[in-house]
Amino acid sequence: MMNNNNHVKGRINVKTIGAGFIILILILTFVSKTVYNYNLPVVTAVIPVNGKLDKTESAKGIAEWADKLEVYTDTGGNVEEIFVKQGDYVRKGQPIVRVSLSEEEITKNRDKAYEIQQVDMDIKNAEDDCSDSKKLYEQGAAPKNDYEKVDRELKALYIKKQKLMLEYQDTSDSGSMTVYAPDNLVVSELSIHKGQKVSSGELVAKCGLTQNLKVNCSITLDNNFITEGDKCKLENSSYSFEGTVTEVKAVEGKKAVSILIQSDKVKAGETFDVKFEKKGAESHTLVPNGALNKDSEGYFLYQIKQREGMLGKEFYVEKLKVYIGDNDNENTIITKGITFFEPVVLLCNKELSKGDTIVLENEGDFFAEKN
């Protein structure tokens, strides 16, 4: 009986020792692998994709009037009253300023009125002569040259009256003249003040035509994706608009861009954040810009592969030479070098060399995780 108990105890001890040995081996393997991996470069990987470049660039822009207009006096005198102020929106036909005419201007205006009366009488007589000459010509009683001569004289009188009317100002016997807005506009600068003596043809105000403004900004000289006709987004704390690129030109190491917007709220001098976006027309093989490396031989990627190591399967990197094309803020086109898609290194905590063993941090995104 006692021998049987000893035999059983012996078997239990052997099993216990064997189990302990196996556990010890596993622990040592785990510790060895942990220590081994601790010194390896840790990388994050990505897979090249098929896609289109999405180009963007941001800039700061300042609004100004796309169409500018200057308003002048038609006669000399003293500024009696100004009806607008800087920044006002003014409708077509709205009064801007009233000028009291000098005695010289009043006399000149009366002379113009008399000349117009005389021309009106000459026109009436010429119209009668022309009508009679036409009848005689049509009846064959007068040569064509006589009729054409009278007709030319009548047309000359019409032109003379038109010129006199442009020079004449209807003061309605008030001794003053009012300058009216020639179009819907915004007064950006007043060039006169009340009581000022002005001459004929003197600048009254600088204006911008309402709704049409342009925003000017600068982009990098190597930006080749922004062209005339492109749409872009403009935004500030008050407004958000879509604008149209009207001009792109190289100026002193950069490119100047003009953008047309239409608004009856925005005023010259306001600043905007401008964002240009354009998606490429064709699909290409793309890798993140951060995955690219360069040495004396050109561009390359670190491609991740698997092999059998001392402690089982392990990951390592191979140097993959590639040729690149265009790029945007995130990705670069690979034109040659990638024949099939395998993960490539995006980030690494250490310097890498060809053949280095690595720890792949996001292994589960590409490979079945090892037990």
Image: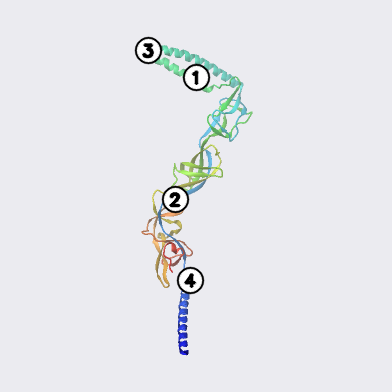
Assess whether mark 2 and mark 4 are in contact (beta carbons under 8 angstroms).
no
| Residue nearest the observer in this picture, 79 or 201 | 79
Which of the numbered marks, if any, corresponds to residue 34?
4
Where residue 206 sits, quadrant-wise, is top right
Of mark 3 and mark 2, the one earlier in the sequence is 2
Q: Amino acid at mark 4?
A: Thr
Which of the numbered marks, if any, corresponds to residue 137?
3
Which of the numbered marks, if any, corresponds to residue 54?
2
**For numbered disc 2, what is the local secondary structure?**
strand
Indicate left or right for 321 with 63 as reference.
left
Mark 4 or mark 1, whichever is nearer to me: 4
Counting from the top left corner in percent of width and height, residue 303 is at: 41, 62
Of mark 3 and mark 4, the one earlier in the sequence is 4
Marks 3/4: CA distance?
A: 119 Å
Marks 4/1: CA distance?
A: 104 Å
Which of the numbered marks, if any, corresponds to residue 161?
1
**For numbered disc 4, what is the local secondary structure?**
helix
**For numbered disc 1, what is the local secondary structure?**
helix
